[in-house]
Image (cartoon, rainbow, N blue to C red):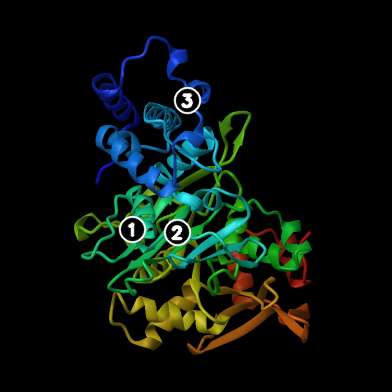
Amino acid sequence: MKSKKRGQTIRENSQVMCEEAPAVESPQAVHPMNIVNNHNLFFSPNDSSKDFGTVLHEVQEYISSKYSTLIIDGGKDEVKTQVKRYISKYLMDYRIAVNGMTDQQLVDALYTEMAEFSFLTKYIFGTGIEEIDINAWNDIEIQYSNGSTVKLDEHFDSPEHAINVIRRMLHVSGMVLDNASPAILGHLSKNIRIAVLKSPLVDEDVGVCASIRIVNPQHLTKDDFVNGGTATGEMLDFLSECLRYGISVCVAGATSSGKTTVAGWLLTTIPDNKRIFTIENGSRELALVREKDGKVVSSVIHTLTRSSDNEKQNIDQDMLLDMALRFNPEIICVGEMRSAEAYTAQESARTGHTVLTTIHSNSCEATWRRMATLCKRKYDISDDTLMSLVTEAFPIVVFTKQLENKQRKMMEIMECEILSDGTRDYRTLFRFHITENRMEGDKFIISGQYHPVQGISQSLQKRFLENGMPQEVLNNILKGGIN
């Protein structure tokens, strides 16, 4: 479903109001608060109170029959005011109230249920929340940025209620959840991803299972990483110089290990005069456009994939990566290697472009093997040949991990050097060494230290110099630090 332009929608809504909304004598008479105040003057809620569910059903039928276009565009401030005004007038005309709720509270609650996302709204648009996991209509968990997980006392009224709310979320991205399409990937906004399953993939009494991932762009500094124990300054400086001087980097790890946060910070260290092209899958996690005195000073193109039930209209990362090469980028960021785009990414890295990407993997060495496996999804090439290609394309791999105590660590930085006889030498440059693992009550206590292990190879030193790295900077890297 194609979304309407804002101006067009407002004009249509205005026509609907002129034809269907009751005439009013003055602006004051239609203000929601004035309607509520007048309601309080002439009507006592105790005279005719109902339960909230009954009122919701009744008001939903009224609003959807007369002002359905307003509900569809319910997020805009102008539309929100209009919908609340009609709800208020309906409650006043039919002398409807709910025990324990003021008129304004009832209007707000009805609007939230009808046009927003029930009790989930405050969590979706709250702060410090990374993920909302709906295991069933009555089992919902919140994952916070600090790594903690909390079970909510709140839940949906029924399996049907859960499905209806999730359908409203998916409507934003034009996706339909039904028996023909019981598994859906969608988005609520550019930084909120939704994955949904309903029956017959889950039991009917569960209603719906969903994962709502809220990916707010992180504006962390080098000091934030160092002070938080994620990495040392030397490690961060080394990776920054790799990207700055044409060495492609892959950041690996499991979900929630901090891969994208690290990759996002690395991109912020790129000089403004270098052109960056980012490709992300469905939602935006990167925010790299920089302004100074009201003028854009960076050179950045952010792009997103687009899913569609029509295969011909599906825009995947591989297609965007092919398009990126026509925009003369100096650095390409592939948000995550998931499939055949891995082959195009390594081709780009081997033909003069600097590529930064992330991948799901469980160690540095395993990362190159996983890249080769993903490349096979595009072309059936021998494993040895693919390993040669991906290790040449991405000589540096970073492995991140979220430990049991919820701390995120850069566990290892590894270089893969291809020797003259075609064999590969895996060189660990930095490593986080765990010295203590113990429990105190129900808390994990994990201690460790970062250590430089080996220096970079002669071949990498040569590439740095050929790509313009000043000898002084290279000398500092060889000494184990960068000024």
Q: Nearer the viewer, residue 367 or 104?
A: 104
Measured as percent of width and height from the top left, residue 81 is found at 44, 28
Would residue 9 appear left or right of 427 to someone viewing this image?
left
Q: Earlier in the sequence, mark 2 or mark 3?
A: 3
Residue for point 52% across, 54% down: 285
Q: Is residue 463 visible?
A: yes
Q: Earlier in the sequence, mark 1 or mark 3?
A: 3
Instruction: Tell me the SS state at disc 2.
Output: loop
Instruction: Tell me the SS state at disc 1.
Output: helix
Residue 156 image label: 2
Residue contact at pointers 1 and 3, CB within 8 angstroms = no
Q: Earlier in the sequence, mark 2 or mark 1?
A: 2
Measured as percent of width and height from the top left, residue 369 is found at 46, 83
* Quadrant of the image occupied by residue 259: bottom right
Q: Nearer the viewer, residue 446 or 428?
A: 446
**Mark 3, residue position:** 32
Label 3, residues with CA under 10 Å away: few <14, some 14-19, many ≥20: many
Q: Nearer the viewer, residue 409 or 302?
A: 409
Please, what is the three-letter code of the amino acid marked with disc 2? Phe
Please, what is the three-letter code of the amino acid marked with disc 1? Asp
Measured as percent of width and height from the top left, residue 171 is found at 32, 49
**Mark 1, residue position:** 322
* Quadrant of the image occupied by residue 408: bottom right
Would residue 60 appear left or right of 223 to someone viewing this image?
left
Residue for point 51% across, 84% down: 366
Residue for point 43% across, 77% down: 371
Residue for point 69% across, 71% down: 407
Real-space CA distance between mark 2 and mark 1, rounded to the nearest whole angstrom: 44 Å
